[in-house]
Image (cartoon, grey):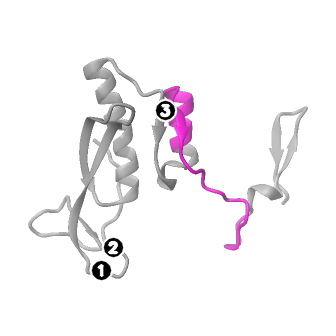
């Protein structure tokens, strides 16, 4: 199962699947992240997936858990609640277009860029052609 491959800076000799991680200001250590798919209305844990402690793997685990619950129990969430990590275009597309799930997540705002790349505000929308035009 591909859970968001990330090149490791450090690899544990005894547990190579664990990730080197640290909380802000805290000591670093090898760890896993426990991810839960919860029916928030009823307070029931529907599925659990352990992943390396990395945001990409954690978000990707949601896809596995949603699919497993659908296959196992014939249940699919109507809505998915998550933090900013779930507000990326690929994840939102998966939720809305592929699964028909209503996202309740903050969307990454890329309108103000200071890294030398173009912001979405710099593109112009052509309604007739149904396309954006790059300013360059």
**The quadrant where residue 47 appears:** top left
Q: Nearer the viewer, residue 9 or 110?
A: 110
Disc 1/disc 3 C-alpha distance (Å): 34 Å
95 falls in the magenta region: yes
Identify the element where label 2 is drawn: loop
x then y, percent, for residue 8: 30, 67
Could you say which disc has been placed on residue 89 in the image?
Answer: none
Identify the element where label 1 is drawn: loop
Could you say which disc has been placed on residue 79 in the image?
Answer: 3
Could you say which disc has been placed on residue 23 in the image?
Answer: 2
Quadrant into which the C terminus falls: bottom right
Q: Please say if 133 is above or below 55.
A: above
Question: As drawn, which residue projects farthest toward the left?
Answer: 14
Residue 102 visible in the current orientation: yes
x then y, percent, for residue 42: 33, 31
Mark 1: few/some/many CA within 10 Å (<14, 14-19, 20+):
few
x then y, percent, for residue 105: 54, 46
Taking the spot 57% from the left edge, 51% from the top edge, the residue there is 106
Taking the spot 11% from the left edge, 69% from the top edge, the residue there is 13
Is 81 displayed left or right of 89 in the figure? left
Could you say which disc has been placed on residue 26 in the image?
Answer: 1
Q: Earlier in the sequence, mark 2 or mark 3?
A: 2
Disc 2 to disc 1: CB gap under 8 Å: yes
């Amino acid at each position: 199962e591909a859970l968001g491959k990330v090149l490791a800076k450090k690899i544990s000799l005894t547990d190579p699947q664990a990730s080197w991680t640290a909380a802000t200001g805290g000591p670093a250590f090898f760890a896993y992240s426990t991810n839960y798919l919860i029916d928030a209305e009823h307070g029931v844990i529907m599925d659990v997936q352990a992943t390396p402690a990395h945001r990409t793997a954690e978000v990707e685990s949601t896809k596995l858990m949603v699919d497993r619950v659908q296959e196992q129990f014939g249940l699919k969430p109507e809505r998915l609640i998550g933090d900013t990590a779930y507000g990326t275009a690929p994840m939102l597309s998966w939720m809305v277009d592929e699964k028909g799930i209503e996202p309740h997540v903050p969307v990454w705002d890329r309108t103000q860029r200071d890294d030398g790349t173009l912001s979405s505000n710099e593109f112009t929308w052509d309604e007739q052609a149904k396309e954006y035009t790059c300013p360059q």
